[in-house]
Image (cartoon, helix red, strand yellow):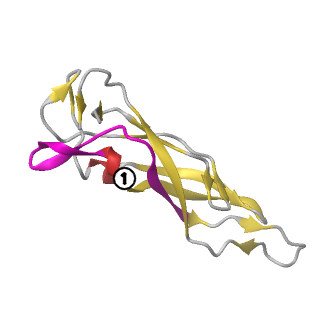
Amino acid sequence: MLDFILISGDRAIFNPIFGKAIVVVRPGFLTGTGIPTVNKKNICIDGDEKKVIVPGCSYTSPPFVIPGMGILSIQSLAANQKSKKVKSKGKVVLLKGNTFKAKFQVMVPATQPTIPPIPPEPDTTLQYSGTGTFMTTNFRAKAT
């Protein structure tokens, strides 16, 4: 089935629920390295999704309610987010598709409040899994 080709500037929209963690998400932006262009922007090809990194996102994970910080990224794409036939530079073209798998990597753990002088207890989970979708500005070019 035909779907819209992703291009430079398109957004990766992360869902805020990452397992038991709740992340204050911001969109990530794709940078296409394929040719040709659509709307004067390079198309995205396999591997371009790996460059979507959103640092500085706060999170909590009850009972760790004092926010921590981490980095959002795309872990893997769904099968319908890679073209089956269309290629650029020998790599498949990326499509809007449905839902990708996302990763939240903890850089500063959220903590659980305690009664002083006991220090706050940190979250020991270093990575959480979630999902996201793409929002494209391309409404002209499609591929399968």
Please give the name of the residue rendered at 57% of the width and 51% of the height, measured from the top-left corner.
57
Residue visible at 34% across and 32% down in the picture: 9
Kindly tell me whether residue 144 is visible in this rendering.
Answer: yes
Q: Which residue lies furthest to the left in this view?
A: 89
Residue 60 horizontal side relative to residue 131, left or right: right
Q: Name the residue under label 1.
A: 77
The magenta region covers: 82-106
Of residues 120 and 26, which is closer to you in this image? Answer: 26
Main secondary structure along the magenta-highlighted residues: strand
Q: Which residue lies furthest to the right in this view?
A: 115
Q: Which of 82 and 105 is in front in this view?
A: 82
Q: Quadrant of the N terminus?
A: top left
Q: Quadrant of the C terminus?
A: top left
Left or right: where 57 falls relative to 77: right
Q: Is mark 1 on a helix, strand or loop?
A: loop
Q: Position of residue 102 (x, y in %)?
A: 47, 55
Q: Identity of the amino acid at label 1?
A: Leu
Would you say residue 87 sits in the magenta stretch? yes
Residue furthest to the front in view is: 1
Asked if the magenta segment contains residue 70, the reply would be no
Seen in the picture, residue 125 relative to 139 is either above or below; the reply is below
Residue placed most toward the observer, 84 or 53? 84
Q: Is residue 121 above or below residue 33?
A: below
Instruction: Return the x and y of residue 63 as percentages of the image width and height.
Output: 79, 66
- Label 1 crowd (10 A; few <14 / some 14-19 / many >=20): many
